[in-house]
Image (cartoon, grey):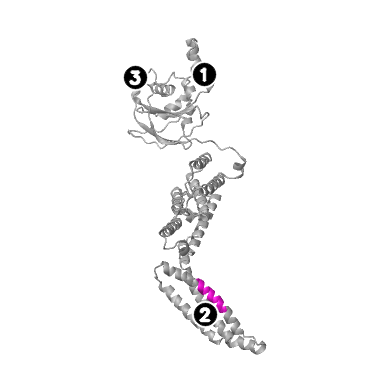
Amino acid sequence: MLGILLGQSPRETEEKKERKFSFRKRKEKLEKRSSTKEVLAATCIQVTEVKPETLNPVWNEHFVFDIDDVHGDLLHMDIWDHDDDVSVAEACKKLNEVSGLRGMGRYFKQIAKSVRSNGTSSSGSSEDNADDFLGCINIPLNEIPVMGYDKWFKLEPRSSASKVQGECHLILRLFTTQRDTTLSKRESKEVIHKKMLSQILEYEHAHIQKEPYNWNGQVSPPAWTVLSHHAVQTDLSPLQQAIIRWQCYSSHHRSQRMCYTLLLRLLRTIDAEWDPQAVQGDLERQLSDSFRLYTDHCLCLMKSMRQVFPCASPAAVTRCELMLRGVGHMQTMPAFKTACPLRNELHLEIATVVKALEEQLRRLVQVVDAVCADVQRGQNVYNKLFYSAVKVDFFSIAYRQLEKLVADDVSVAMEKVCGTLEQESSRLTQTMGETLLELYMSLKILKRFREFLPLR
């Protein structure tokens, strides 16, 4: 059984100190003494399930209480060894039907005594069958830190006569209801949380002295407190938080490189929390956009893979591996298949990027062959027409212009090929070798036309 004990105002505390040394009649003191129901109203009481036949019960239950005074109220919890046939929940519900202690049985006398004593010493005796009472916990709400509690609490006796031992693990969080601000009326809670996180990432990353790809995305405790409190106050689910974190971190990564391990971990978090029924509308569209933008970014890096992830750098190779693992994990995620149903052949897109250099060489061979054919026609047909009519050497002008364009394209392509051969320890694939041979033969044919150029 657990509930909130209402605190006392400073004025009530002073009055209590004055009455302690006054000579008021006993009757007056009895009239002013609060009843148990006033100390802990029945509507504030919540009861866990009974765990039968166990010395180490595990509840995993969630309770929410409305707090009036966070500075004075306390969380009070009793733990009992329940042996009766009547459930504790049903018994506590009957508190609403009882105006005081009169009419309650032995069991509720013990509950009332534990609440009234609030864990302090009293002159109780053992006639209350205290062996049913296993202990209580009293936690002042003003002692709960900003980040909450996630710890074991030692059980306390309700009186000096009680023999209590044991611990109870509790997770406690304090949060407030959201105010109707202008921003909250204009934007959804997801959009507001996303804007907050994006601004925090920009600020935190700018003030951290880290090399590119080395920042793990961890923010300062105050920033984490603001984000966690806003998430709790707006009732963002773990899945919504995971999606928003992925959107913000993956977007930030495109402008300022971050650790790929973090991005992979964020994807796995979405995978673990995924519920297609909970992601619809704008959130699904935003998730789809984030997947698309990150995938396109990775494909762009793959096109310049040998420059971005040079084989000579072990750290760069590791980054490349983590990036590929992230993309590989993404395409297997149910979230990716739901948000991006038309992009179900991502592996083919990656294969296309890998083959891009070979395709460039193949297209270059076709271009050189087309230039050779055009030069041949220019020499046999157009050159005679132009020279006989207007005395213009059409062949020389066209050949030199086309030769320069071909030379520029071949130079760029061969730089990429040489870089590839150096990084791959001179290992040349058969397809690329055949393509290079074709390019060589085409360039050799083009070079032969230089013999028809006039001597200067």
Residue identifier under label 1 = 14
Q: In the image, what residue type sits under mark 1? A: Glu
Residue farthest along the right direction in this orientation: 390
Observer able to see residue 30: no
The spot of residue 106 in percent (x, y) is 38, 21
Secondary structure, mark 2, is helix
Q: Between marks 3 and 1, how big is the CA–CA gap?
A: 33 Å
Instruction: Name the residue nearer the viewer: 121 or 209.
Output: 209
Residue identifier under label 3 = 126
Instruction: Name the residue nearer the viewer: 197 or 181.
Output: 197
The spot of residue 125 in percent (x, y) is 35, 18
The spot of residue 427 in percent (x, y) is 39, 70
Residue identifier under label 2 = 369
Label 2 crowd (10 A; few <14 / some 14-19 / many >=20): some
Q: Which residues are magenta?
A: 402-412
Q: In the image, what residue type sits under mark 3? A: Ser
Secondary structure, mark 1, is helix
